[in-house]
Image: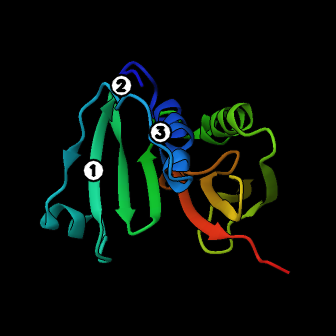
Amino acid sequence: MSSTLTPAQFAAAFAVERCLPLIQGKTVGDPPSTPPVALTEDERNKLGLTEESLTFFYATGDTGVFLDSAHAKQTLWFNGADCEQGAAIFDQRLKQAHPQARQIDDLVSPSTPGMRARVYEVDLGGDVLAWIELAYPAAGARANARKFVIRIEPRRRNKR
C-alpha cells in the first residue's frame, strides 16, 4: 500500500487486503509503505478508547488513518479528508476482491445524526464470515459528521 493513497483509499485497501485475509488465517502481503505509529495509553484515552486493544496511526496524505485492534475486531477510521467518498471506495475495493460480498443494509444511523451506516457480510470460505460495518457522512452532513469508519468482525456460519 502506497503512502500516496488518500485516507479512504488506504482504509479500504487495508481492510480488504490485510484484515480480511487475517480472518481467513492467510498470510498477508507487503506491509503498508507508511510505517505505523503506536498510540500510548494517554493518546488512546483522549480518543475515548477504553477497551483493551492496540491502536496505531498511519500517516496518509495531509492526515492519516487510525487502526484499533481489539482481539479479533478491527476498526479503521479517519476524520475529514475524503470521508464522503469512503463508502463508494470501500464498496468497489471489497467487490473487486470478494464479488460474493453481500450488502445487508444501508440506513440512516440511529445513534449519530448526519451519519449513515452500511453493513456487509463476506463469505471467506468454510464456516468463516466477516461482518463489516461502515459509518459515513450522509449527503450534506455538517462538519461534525465528517468521519469514516470501517469495523470488521469475524463470525462463524450458523450450522443447521
Depth check, front residue: 29 or 96: 29
Q: Secondary structure at mark 2?
A: loop
- Sequence order check: which comes first, mark 2 or mark 3? 3
Q: Secondary structure at mark 1?
A: strand
Q: Position of residue 48 (x, y in %)?
A: 31, 71
- Sequence order check: which comes first, mark 1 or mark 2? 1
Give the CA separation, mark 3 to mark 1. Answer: 13 Å
Residue that badge 1 annotates: 56
As displayed, is residue 51 above or below residue 68? below
Q: Amino acid at mark 3?
A: Phe
Name the mark on residue 14: 3
Q: Position of residue 125 (x, y in %)?
A: 71, 53
Horizontally, residue 129 falls left or right of residue 81, namely right
Residue that badge 2 annotates: 61
Q: Quadrant of the C terminus?
A: bottom right
Q: Amino acid at mark 1?
A: Phe
Q: What's the residue at 54%, 59% (across, down)?
A: 151
Tell me if label 1 and label 2 are in contact, CB under 8 Å. Answer: no
Q: Position of residue 62 (x, y in %)?
A: 32, 27
Q: What's the residue at 56%, 51% (across, down)?
A: 142
| Mark 1 Cα-neighbour bin, 10 Å: few <14, some 14–19, many ≥20 | some
Q: Amino acid at mark 2?
A: Gly
